[in-house]
Image (cartoon, grey):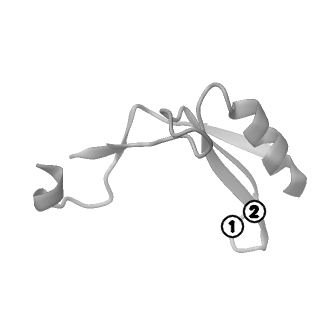
Amino acid sequence: MAGWPTYCARCGGPAIALVEAGHPGSGHYRAETTCHRHTAAAHRWAAHVGPTRTTPLGDIQPALFELPEVTR
């Protein structure tokens, strides 16, 4: 299965984590992918809506579906 790299929302570098706070669909939700350098800033930003949680990301995230004309 092909994958796509995930990038930091602040600098465009490789992302290492997804930082989230709040609940999707509630109007009080913040999420951001971050690199090592911007992880603390993402936690501060997300904490405005509640306690933060972090999900580590691998080097390549799985693709939702295969597009042979794109993934070649």
Dot 1: element: loop
Residue 46 position within the rendered picture, expressed as x and y whole percent measured from the top left:
79, 49
Answer yes or no: do the residues labelled 1 and 2 have beta carbons within 8 Å?
yes
Residue 62 % position (x, y): 33, 47
> In which quarter of the view is residue 37 placed?
top right
First in sequence: mark 1 vs mark 2: 1
Query: Extreme front residue here?
Result: 11
- Name the spot of residue 67 as percent of width and height, x first: 17, 61
Q: Residue 24: which quarter of the image?
A: bottom right
Q: Residues within 10 Å of mark 1 (few under 14, many from 20)?
A: few
Q: Secondary structure at mark 2?
A: strand
Of the pair 8 and 54, the residue shown nearer to us? 8
Q: Residue at x 20, y 59 (%)?
A: 66
2 to 30, vertically: above or below: above
Residue 33 horizontal side relative to residue 49, left or right: left
Query: Mark 2: few, some, or many residues within 10 Å (few <14, many ≥20)?
Result: some
* Residue that badge 1 annotates: 24
Residue at 77 percent of width and 31 percent of height: 40
The single residue placed furthest to the top in the displayed view is: 36
Residue 13 shown left or right of residue 28 in the figure:
left
Q: Amino acid at mark 1?
A: Pro
Residue underneath mark 2? 29
Marks 1 and 2, how far apart at CA = 5 Å
Which residue is drawn at the image coordinates 17% and 57% (left, top)? 70
Q: Please tell me the numbered disc located at residue 16.
A: none
* Residue 19 drawn at (x, y percent): 68, 44
**Looking at the picture, which amino acid does disc 2 mark?**
Tyr
